[in-house]
Amino acid sequence: MRRTLPKPKTYMLVLFLAPILILYLANAVLPIFISIFYSFFNWTGGRTMKFIGFANYIDMVKDAEFWRSAYNNLIIVILCTVGQVGLALIFSFLYLSKALKFKEFHRTVLFFPVTVSALVIGFIWSLMYNKDYGLINFFLRLLGLERLILSWLDDPSYILITASLPVALQYIGLYMIMFMGAIKSIPEEILECAGLDGCNDFQRSIHITLPMIYDTFKVAVMICVSGTMKIFDHILVLTNGGPGKSSQVLALYSYKISFDRMKLSYGATISIGILILSVILTMGSRKLLGGKQYE
């Protein structure tokens, strides 16, 4: 006779979940409400707080620097979504190929950057981008491609591309793990039948695997969009928003407003603006990708 395990008591579930819930509320939810509260005041960090209603939000809507930072954020979101999710999907399909050897090694190498601090990644890439002694220009000289040598972090015309590359490459492994987990859930019989019907690896990936993991793909895109909207560490170390303000993003703008200019209430308002734009872009990407289920 099969023995069933007793259901856990409700108070035991609450006991185990309470510490995690408290940490989440203290670190994620509570700061949002605190920022909303401060956004209705004129506050520079002292004891005096003057209530000004929606004046900060009106100033934010009229702030050209805010919208320039939002535009930079949008470009980085597009580049990182294509780079991270797109490459992760391609690598996941490659793992289905029997021709690929040392799969565990490749998986570890691709996932390792995810475990490294964003500040460390940004610092390493700032050294690689250096015009005089950086590895990128060193190899270009070694290959006789001096014409391709550039000041990678000093030209506004392509600074957003060079700033997005470290972010895109760092988190490919995260989305690859998501896709591989979804692929593992596909019944092996379906893939075997496709092989017996004459489908090659490419056809099997496009016509069978992709439709069956489409929901995971949508989730990955939404996570990537929302995560890239709050990008800060990489840009701070790589460019600090420069040259000029050509790579300044919203989180960095909020930081500078709050701690360089000591406009703490306006910095809180910008952080709420980041939240609103993130929700709009995330829901927009979900709508763009469609809501239909693939059977």
Image (cartoon, rainbow, N blue to C red):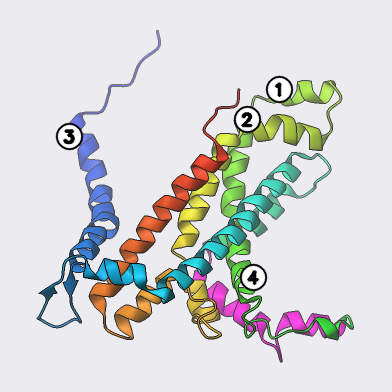
Camera-nearest residue between 273 and 143: 273
Residue 166, x across and y down, in percent: 61, 69
Residue 257 image offset from top left, x and y in percent: 33, 79
Which of marks 3 and 2 precedes in the sequence?
Answer: 3
Residue 32 highlighted magenta (yes or no): no
Per the rendering, the mark at residue 190 is: 1
Please tell me whether mark 1 or mark 4 is closer to you in this view.
4
Q: Which residue is mark 3?
A: 11
Q: Quadrant of the N terminus?
A: top left
Considering only vertical position in the picture, is 184 above or below 157?
Answer: above
Residue 232 in sight = no
For the C terminus, give its image quadrant.
top right
- Name the mark on residue 161: 4
Identified by mark 4, the residue type is Ile
Where are the magenta residues, as a range?
115-142
Q: Which mark is residue 287?
A: none
Residue topped by disc 2: 212
Helix, strand or loop status at disc 4:
helix
Marks 1 and 3 sit apart, C-alpha to C-alpha, by 44 Å
User: Who is closer to the viewer here, 76 or 214?
Assistant: 76
The Cα–Cα distance between marks 1 and 4, rounded to whole angstroms, is 40 Å
Going from N to C along the chain, the mark reached first, 1 or 4, is: 4
